[in-house]
Image (cartoon, rainbow, N blue to C red):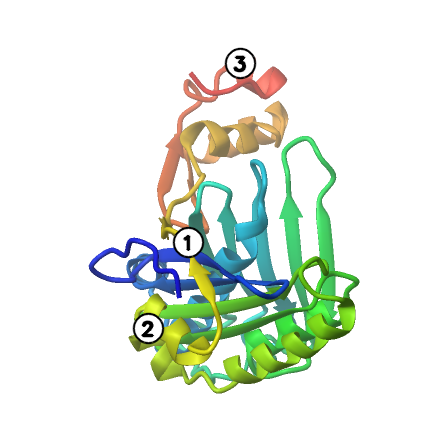
Amino acid sequence: MTPAPMPATDADIRQRFLFEDYDVRGEIISLRGTVAEVCARGGYPRPLRIQLGEFLAAAALLSANLKSAGTVTVQARGDGPVPLLMADCSDRHTLRAIARPRDPAAGCGDDLRALVGQGHLSVTVALPDRQRHQGIAPLEHPRLADCLSEYFSRSEQLPTRLWLAADGDAAAGLLLQALPAQRQDPAARARTWEHLVALADTLTPDEQLGLRHENLLRRLFHQERVRLFDPVPVGFACSCSAARIGGAIVTLGADALAELFTATPEIETQCQFCHQVYRFTPAQLSARALAGGAPLH
């Protein structure tokens, strides 16, 4: 293996790796502080912390292919006890996630299908000034990694598999993706793909959460030539701001806002991701903003 410079710990980094002799690439990620930040802000019980950890790792892995400004969102929606679970990652490697349980006090299991209920999984790529691309698949497996692997198997994209692990305090993920055949003919690439996936299937959650990236890849692929690239830091960040939240409020229209302000001296709202509270007075939502949705002063 060709090593890359490594930090003291593999917490909150993502790394790309390539197989020198094959048309297959990979991504590997470890998250700790990000999971803690997201879950502390939401006050989630441990089962939802585990689910959100896996969603965060998945979003970060899938966003590694972003070539320009944009965001990748992984989302599960349904009619179950937790009708929404989602995470997104931007091209700046910033992550956020939310869960919306119907009853925060109710117990939660670890089966994604049982939590979300009858519904679907979606992967959305949003790029500025372009039409969003969204793929949708049914929720047919109890774990997110299996649902995503099924999603890719049904799409026309290159063969892709994910392995995810989380324990409520940390999360980790591994992604393998076949590339267009260049070093190998298609038949040889298919055989290689099956071989590498079989090796990755031996990975345990404890190994994912406990081993450093270089050691984990050596454990799985010690007979292959693997090039590990420099680590990319990732972490929690929210895109909310007073200007953005205020701009959304003024789209309600002058009449609706005037009615709201007759009942209260200020409008209070909270970001669903970071739980930052924003308060606006009529002066802050100026007449110009009310008329045209202009940014706040």
User: Is residue 259 in view from this perspective?
Assistant: no
Dot 3 and dot 2 residues touching (CB under 8 Å)? no
Depth check: give the residue in front, 82 or 148: 148
Please report whichever mark, 3 or 2, sits nearer to the chain's N-terminal start: 2
Residue 75 in percent (x, y) is at 60, 62
Q: Give left or right: position of 8 versus 40.
A: left
Image quadrant containing the C terminus: top left
Q: Give left or right: position of 92 versus 10.
A: right
Query: At x 52% / y 71%, what residue is drawn?
Result: 102
Query: At x 43% / y 83%, what residue is drawn?
Result: 107
Dot 3 and dot 1 residues touching (CB under 8 Å)? no
For the residues marked 2 and 1, what is the alpha-carbon distance in whole angstroms?
14 Å
Image quadrant containing the N terminus: bottom left
Q: Which residue is mark 1?
A: 229
Labels 3, 1: front one: 1
Q: Which residue is mark 3?
A: 287
Q: Which residue is mark 2?
A: 215
Classify 10 Å Cα crowding around label 1: few (below 14), some (14-19), many (20 and above): some
Residue 16 in percent (x, y) is at 47, 56
Residue 279 in percent (x, y) is at 38, 34
Dot 2 and dot 1 residues touching (CB under 8 Å)? no
Residue 147 in percent (x, y) is at 63, 75
Q: Say which amino acid is labelled 2.
A: Asn
Residue 189's image quarter?
Answer: bottom right
Depth check: give the residue in front, 109 or 73: 73
Query: At x 64% / y 38%, what residue is drawn?
Result: 127
Find numbered disc 3 in the image and state the secondary structure of the residue it sits on.
Answer: helix
